[in-house]
Amino acid sequence: MIGGIIALMAVGIIDAYFVGQLGTASLAALGFVLPVTHGVNSIGLGLGMAASVLVSRYLGEDRFERAARQITDGRLLITLIGTGLLLCLYFGVASLLRLLGASGEVLDEALRFMALWIPVIPLLLLTLTGNTILRAIGCPGKSAFLLALLATLNAGLDPILIFGYGPIPGLGIGGAALATSIAWILTFLISQYILGVQEQLILTRKNTLQALFANWAKLLAIGIPAIFANLMTPLAAAILTAMVARFGTTAVAGFGVSTRIESLCLLIAFALSSTLPMFIGQNIGAGKLERARVALYGAIRFSLIFQLVVWLIVASCSRSIGSAFSDNAEVVDIISHYLWIIPATYGAHAVTILVMVSLNALKKPKIALLTALIRLLLLNIPIAYIGGQFYGINGLFYGFALGNVLSAIVAWRIINRAWAEQVEQAEQNK
């Protein structure tokens, strides 16, 4: 899954690289777009998490037919949710971008991107959740292949559609959106073939309305808290973007690039978080609690050590990384400062990520949501705001970093208590 996650993160980085060549306004527009696209992705990841928890438990209990029924019914619900999101953003995206602080040329550029990205939302959600299901059934290789295909298509189409080639006119930032949309459509078609034909997990026979609604209720019982927990990250990004916007367009441009680099730096944590819940779910379903426990705490320890190494590498190359994305000295400075400060706490951030996904696997989605709320709304955002008020944009970065550390301490205490309850429940069921 590491290769697959690198590919998925590369989509945003590739877009930032080519769009950065259009100028600071276009790069800043991409920074304003990021919280919106991440918000939609988070909904897909939340629904995928819910589906994977249910499917992995069913497979651990050796109930393949039940898992296939849950997947089939769930994809219908996901299609309806995606269509609703499409309509909401179609009519409200301009107001949302203005709320984030976009205006003038930057707002126009952001709207050009969104106009060509919004129509693909339902297929994007189906592809994201389909990928999660592939991991839940023990096929991470196929999931990673689809993510790599997505990134490869996006990378190949970006320069052609952004700058033009032969008879194909350059569309600027709209070309980046169109490239991403085409990549999602093609990846969805292959994903549908893998799930429906190869794995035979999409059933053709209809279900009764009562059973359909029952499966939707199971999905949403885990999915709604998981969606809100996942939405906390893009919500924080949106709030931080609005905070950073007070320091000017160059600050937003530098911040937008930095957050894309951040995703790549956390790829190991994301790869673990995309497989660990399914591993825990299958083993709990099969009654192997100790195996699940070793995986959970081993992943946390490994992430702390690995992210320290990542910080040392990124910090030492921070200015070179900034220069690769922009020739504006102020933008490069902001990227460099960000990569020195916040990555130092990526280990703590990884702990919180792994705890939240593991809580979903333990069927404690509300506790996972509470962990996310504490991290972002009670710790990271308020401390970052205070830091920004007193010490400028670097103070904002230091405040957010401190919030990461405090959040990890809270998450650690929560997962210890949740696991103790899981063990106690297992003992009672014997």
Image (cartoon, helix red, strand yellow):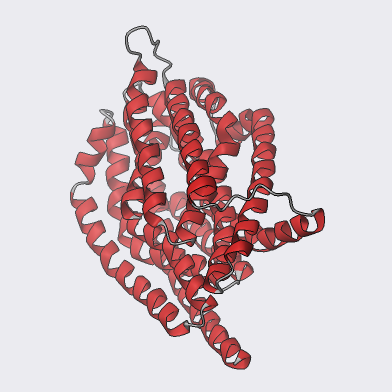
> Where does residue 103 sit, x and y in percent of width and height?
54, 26
Q: Nearer the viewer, residue 275 or 398?
A: 275
Q: Residue at x 33, y 59 (%)?
A: 268
> Where does residue 312 sit, x and y in percent of width and height?
21, 58
Task: Spot the residue most to the top.
Answer: 167
324 to the left or right of 414: left
> Where does residue 421 sit, x and y in percent of width and height?
57, 85
22 above or below 228?
above
Residue 83 visible? The answer is yes
71 above or below 159?
below
Q: Nearer the viewer, residue 402 or 43?
A: 43
330 above or below 365?
above
Image quadrant where residue 274 sits: bottom left
Q: Nearer the viewer, residue 197 or 377?
A: 197
18 to the left or right of 183: left
Q: Nearer the viewer, residue 385 or 228?
A: 228
Image quadrant where residue 343 sits: bottom left
> Where does residue 235 sit, x and y in percent of width and height?
56, 49
Q: Residue at x 32, y 12 (%)?
A: 165
Q: Residue at x 38, y 20 (%)?
A: 162
Residue 257 visible? The answer is no
Locate the N terminus by quadrant: bottom left
